[in-house]
Amino acid sequence: MSDEKKADTPAEKPGEPTATAPEPTVDSDDLHATDLDLTEARATGDTAPVQIGERRGMFGPTKGGDTTGYGGLRTPILFPGASEKPYGSYFDELTGTLETALGEAGDTAYGNAVERVVVDRGELTLHVAREALPTVARALRDDPALRFEICTGVSGVHFPNETGRELHAVYHLLSITHNRRVRLEVSAPDGDATIPSIVSIYPSADWHERETWDMFGIIFEGHPALTRILMPDDWPGHPQRKDYPLGGIPVEYKGGVVPPPDERRSYN
């Protein structure tokens, strides 16, 4: 350091604390207001994560004692909320073309038919109102700029704690022409578990809708033959619903008998 610089620097006395700039203070009320504004903004745009349940303990037991030592854990089960444009990839083009194909009037207009658009992990999911499902599926199949020719599968999901939307049917569509994929998700309440069938649009959905009915009890209106496909015709209930009782068949093994799961000792 030059002598000139040394002269400009104030000398520090031994034992005297070094002067520091005061830290800025933030009013707690301002922090609360800012946090509240962010929360309201997210809620308005429906972009906040959606909680569909809560996991308790290490392995999620809901009845009886917890033997893991983590009984106090409470972990929310969160699904991604709605996404905002631009979505990225081909998703903006796809949703824009679908909006044009559906038109701007009536219950099947894009704003009424598509309840929420979710982009997560590089995948596009359109949450569709159940009464608009056939119209949306037909537009995705027939529009030359969309051309989703194949429905590769129909999946069922059961969320007992999602009041009014307990049962979900998920359709996976593939466009060979454009090498694109899109997922349609439709929900129905447990008390009215009916969703329109799309077999007339995608014939390959025939067996998939039967399996979803068999396992989850979703009634696909308009299906040509909605019968069980995995379980016997006289089987009671729908085994993959989360409120289905845990049961089984006694199994003999080397002279011993293994009781059904619902008869075994359990901490759940």
Image: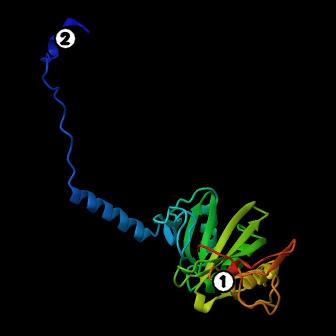
Which residue is found at the position 13% from the left and 17% from the top? 14
Q: Residue furthest front?
A: 255
Q: Is residue 250 left or right of residue 95?
A: right
Judging by the rendered image, the residue that carries numbered circle 1 is 244
Q: Which residue is mark 2?
A: 6
For image coordinates 52% across by 65% down, the residue present is 57
Question: Residue 146 at x, y = what percent?
Answer: 71, 68
Label 1, residues with CA under 10 Å away: few <14, some 14-19, many ≥20: few
Q: Earlier in the sequence, mark 2 or mark 1?
A: 2
Residue 168: image quadrant is bottom right
Indicate the secondary structure of the residue bearing disc 1: loop
Q: Is residue 81 visible?
A: no
Residue 223 appears in the picture as rendered: yes
| Residue at the image position 75 percent from the left and 79 percent from the top | 259
Q: For residue 156, what is the image quadrant?
A: bottom right
Relative to residue 163, is residue 185 drawn left or right?
Answer: right
Judge whether 66 appears above or below 206 on screen: above
Q: Nearer the viewer, residue 250 or 238?
A: 250
Is label 2 in a helix, a strand or a loop? Answer: helix
Which mark is in front, 2 or 1?
1
